[in-house]
Structure formats: C-alpha cells, structure tokens
C-alpha cells in the first residue's frame, strides 16, 4: 500500500528499521546511533500497475540526543519528542517531508504512458502516534499512528492521510519482527490528478474517460524482519519487508487500474544495514 511504499516507486518503503539494540525491547537507549542500509526490491511500475520492476533502495535512521529520525526512500521524519527509557507509553510527533514520483516517467504500459508524465510532488506534513511497550511479551510493542501530508509543489496540490496499527516484538535474541495494517485516504484533487482521464487523454490512450473522486484509496498490510549478524548494539544486520495492498473505490475503478493495471499491489525488498 502507499502507506508502506510512501511516495516512491523506486525506493525502499517507509519502514521503521530496528537496530539490534532497539530490538531488545522497550524504548531505544539515549546513546546516539546511526543506521544506514542498502538493498534491492520489486515494486509496481506505478500506483495501480500490473507490471513490476526491480528497484534500488536504502534506509537511513538514527537517534540524536534522544530524538529519532528516519530517512526511508524519499521520506524524512524527525520525532520532536525525546525518548524516555523508563516510560511504558511512548508518544511520537514530528514533521514529515517527502517526494512523490508516481507516473513522473518511465511508464511501461503504452496506454498509461500516452496520458503523459505527471509532475513530482513535494509533500510536507506531520506524523503522530502512541505506543505501548510490554504488550504480549516483554519486548512487544503495540502502536497507533497517522501521517498527514500536503503537496506544496503544485503537482496534486492536495492532502493524504495514512493511519496505521502495528505490533513489534523480538523473536529469539537477534530477530526483530513488525507487522502493520493500515489505510490511505486521499482528497478529490489527488484522485483526479492521478486516476482521472480527460477526454483528450482518452483519445490519446484508448482508455475510457473517467472522473475520479477521493476517499479511501487503499488498505493493506506489511511484515518487516531484521536479523542482527553481530549480536551487539552495533554492527551488521539483514532486513526484509513484504507488503500487499488493495486499491479501493474510484482508485480501483479508474481505467488506469481496472483496464491497464491491477488493484492489488505487492512490494518486496531485502538488504544489508550497518549500525554504529
């Protein structure tokens, strides 16, 4: 789902990569950390496509003076609320900035390509959430959160909101697993920009004209796993993620999806990371 891949068709999803120390359970330690990872994955050619391609990707995240930051693909989040190692309930709130490259170039499907390239969006917003440690196990954590963004570059020039629920826990001493379910909601203007087909576009592509309305865009789930190779706070780790989502409403009914693509979308990626 777009919540997982966020705004890029070629980058790693917006995952909360866990270092070995964070996987030990409870809030992350106060000591500064920095994690960088590289990998490869597979994703749909555009939102709603039925063709897939291999993609490069990476993840950067860390903690500075108790404040977490994550740069996953083209999305940066900075938590303005400092971590507290003794707090069972954790709050998360901070700014988000991201890019959206959907249908901005390199479309394989000839009909969709005939509709023309779209502008890249620059999305600014806010993410907030609450997490409860010690749920189900000593290392279990249940979290509720939502991300709100608005395009400021004049592409779709509208908003999206993505609520989610996830549960994470340590499996054994070195493996961290997180499962999430969530949804994406988008405005009428967003739906129109990415999923409508004008009469001129219909003539050029052979697809039927269509006026898309906003609302619930997609629902989906994902699973993330990381495995420490070093067994310590720092060192090498492996990561992998898989997700599946289903477009809804006018987003699925658009001929861009219904006739030229597929409402069911998959994403998968794996790679190697280092924490220091």
Image (cartoon, rainbow, N blue to C red):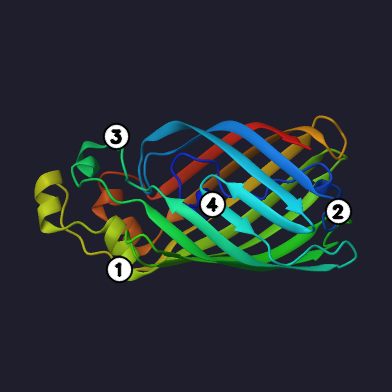
Residue at x-position 55% and y-position 38%: 268
Pointer 2 local density, CA inside 10 Å: few below 14, some 14–19, many at least 20: some
The alpha-carbon separation of the residues under discs 2 and 3 comes to 46 Å
Lower position in the chain sequence, tag 4 or tag 2: 2
Q: Are marks 1 and 3 in contact (CB under 8 Å)?
A: no
Pointer 1 local density, CA inside 10 Å: few below 14, some 14–19, many at least 20: many
Residue at x-position 63% and y-position 55%: 180
Question: Which SS class for mark 4?
Answer: strand
x, y (%) of residue 249?
36, 64
x, y (%) of residue 87?
86, 68
| Residue 75, disc | 4
The alpha-carbon separation of the residues under discs 4 and 2 comes to 24 Å
Lower position in the chain sequence, tag 1 or tag 3: 3
Lower position in the chain sequence, tag 2 or tag 1: 2
Lower position in the chain sequence, tag 4 or tag 1: 4
Decide which of 127, 79 is in the foreground and name it: 79
Quadrant (top left, top right, bottom left, bottom right) of the C terminus: top right
Lower position in the chain sequence, tag 2 or tag 3: 2
The alpha-carbon separation of the residues under discs 2 and 1 comes to 45 Å
Q: Answer left or right for 200 relative to 261.
A: left
Lower position in the chain sequence, tag 3 or tag 4: 4
Residue at x-position 56% and y-position 61%: 96
Q: Answer left or right for 125 relative to 215.
A: right
Pointer 3 local density, CA inside 10 Å: few below 14, some 14–19, many at least 20: some
The residue that mark 3 highlights is 108
The alpha-carbon separation of the residues under discs 4 and 1 comes to 26 Å
The residue that mark 2 highlights is 29
Question: Which SS class for mark 3?
Answer: loop
Q: Are marks 3 and 4 in contact (CB under 8 Å)?
A: no
The residue that mark 1 highlights is 213
* Numbered label tally: 4
């Amino acid at each position: 789902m777009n919540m997982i891949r966020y705004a890029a068709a070629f980058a790693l999803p917006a995952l909360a990569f866990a270092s070995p120390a964070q996987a030990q359970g409870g809030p992350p330690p106060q000591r500064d950390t920095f994690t960088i990872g590289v990998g490869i994955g597979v994703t749909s050619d555009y939102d709603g496509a039925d063709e897939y391609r291999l993609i490069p990707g990476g993840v950067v995240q860390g903690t500075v003076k108790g404040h977490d930051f994550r740069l996953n693909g083209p999305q940066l989040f900075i938590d303005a609320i400092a971590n507290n190692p003794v707090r069972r309930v954790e709050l998360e709130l901070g700014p988000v900035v991201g890019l959206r490259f959907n249908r901005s170039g390199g479309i394989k499907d000839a009909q969709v390509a005939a509709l023309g390239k779209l502008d890249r969006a620059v999305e600014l917003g806010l993410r907030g959430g609450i997490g409860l440690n010690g749920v189900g196990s000593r290392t279990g954590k249940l979290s509720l959160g939502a991300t709100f963004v608005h395009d400021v570059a004049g592409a779709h020039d509208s908003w999206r909101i993505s609520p989610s629920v996830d549960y994470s826990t340590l499996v054994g001493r070195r493996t961290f697993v997180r499962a999430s379910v969530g949804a994406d909601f988008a405005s009428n203007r967003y739906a129109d920009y990415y999923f409508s087909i004008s009469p001129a576009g219909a003539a050029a592509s052979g697809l039927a004209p269509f006026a898309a309305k906003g609302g619930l865009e997609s629902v989906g789930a994902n699973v993330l796993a990381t495995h420490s190779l070093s067994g310590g706070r720092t060192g090498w780790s492996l990561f992998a993620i898989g997700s599946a989502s289903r477009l809804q409403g006018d987003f699925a009914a658009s001929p861009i999806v219904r006739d030229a693509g597929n409402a069911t979308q998959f994403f998968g990626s794996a790679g190697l990371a280092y924490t220091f």
